[in-house]
Amino acid sequence: NAGVTQTPKFRVLKTGQSMTLLCAQDMNHEYMYWYRQDPGMGLRLIHYSVGEGTTAKGEVPDGYNVSRLKKQNFLLGLESAAPSQTSVYFCASSTTSGGLISYEQYFGPGTRLTVT
Amino acid sequence: AQSVSQHNHHVILSEAASLELGCNYSYGGTVNLFWYVQYPGQHLQLLLKYFSGDPLVKGIKGFEAEFIKSKFSFNLRKPSVQWSDTAEYFCAVDNYGQNFVFGPGTRLSVLP
């Protein structure tokens, strides 16, 4: 049981380049999330998904797109990277009681992205 | 919008000192409350959580937290810290149907 995995672990991009971060979970969780972590700002939610085929915007969605084609995978895309997107990106997943109550989130190891 | 505040940005303690990290949230309805820890270079791990019942919850590694509804607070405590507790600590609130909102984090440095 690997939990939540993320690829790649590190990446350096030039301004304007694009890339996709992959998050995978093997816990059959319904909810998945993408956060960015910046010094002094904690974790900020970028996008989230409450189930396969559904996505929604979080606190800081601009410049990012996501897709959840399979329940176990949640992709985060940067179409045209900017230096302001230099950050550590964490994926998380959680399960629910069947309604709106979600339980604790399980986090992946993170992706450190630098945009020059 | 809901917000979560943590009282201290950086706390420095000596080993065996007692720890209390403050957390307050702004949402007035029913909430689930969490404390996560992030050790240097690692991902976030759950320390403890409160959903309902006894407002004093115990977590891993000797940590506990008390939910005081009237104060919208969920403070984290440990009676005697160790050098290995050096980490960043995040309070988080889930307000049923919304999403997790994390506090900005408190960095704890424990001096040997």
Image (spheres, rainbow, N blue to C red):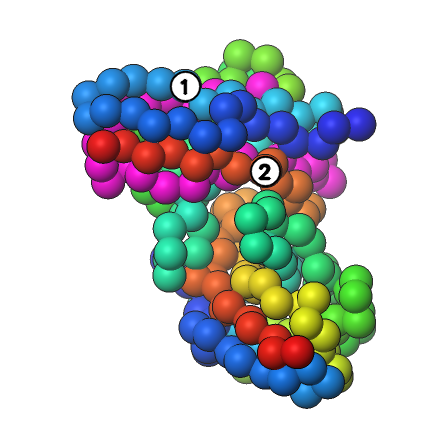
Residue situated furthest bottom in the rendering: B17
First in sequence: mark 2 vs mark 1: 1
- Which mark identifies residue A20? 1
Left or right: B110 as drawn, with respect to B80: left
Q: Is residue A85 visible?
A: yes
Q: Is residue A96 magenta?
A: yes
Residue at horizontal 37 percent and vertical 61 percent from the top: A40
Q: Is residue B4 above or below residue B99?
A: below
Looking at the image, residue A79 sits to the left or right of residue B91; the answer is left
Task: Please identify the quarter of the rendering in which residue B62 is found.
Answer: bottom right
Camera-nearest residue between A78 and B102: A78
The residue stretch that appears in magenta:
A73-99
The residue that label 2 is drawn on is A109
* Residue A11, horizontal then vertical, whole percent: 40, 27
> Which amino acid is tagged 2?
Pro
Q: Is residue A58 visible?
A: no
Q: Secondary structure at mark 1?
A: strand
In the picture as drawn, the residue positioned furthest to the top comes out as: A69
For the point 53% across and 12% down, the residue is A69
Q: Residues within 10 Å of mark 2 (few under 14, many from 20)?
A: some
| Location of residue A107 by image quarter | top right
Q: Position of residue B85 (x, y in %)?
A: 67, 68
Given contact means CB atoms under 8 Å apart, are the residues at marks 2 and 1 in contact? no
- For the point 45% across and 30% down, the residue is A10
Taking depth in this image into account, of B81 and A106 the one nearest to the observer is B81
The residue positioned 53% from the left and 80% from the top of the image is: B12
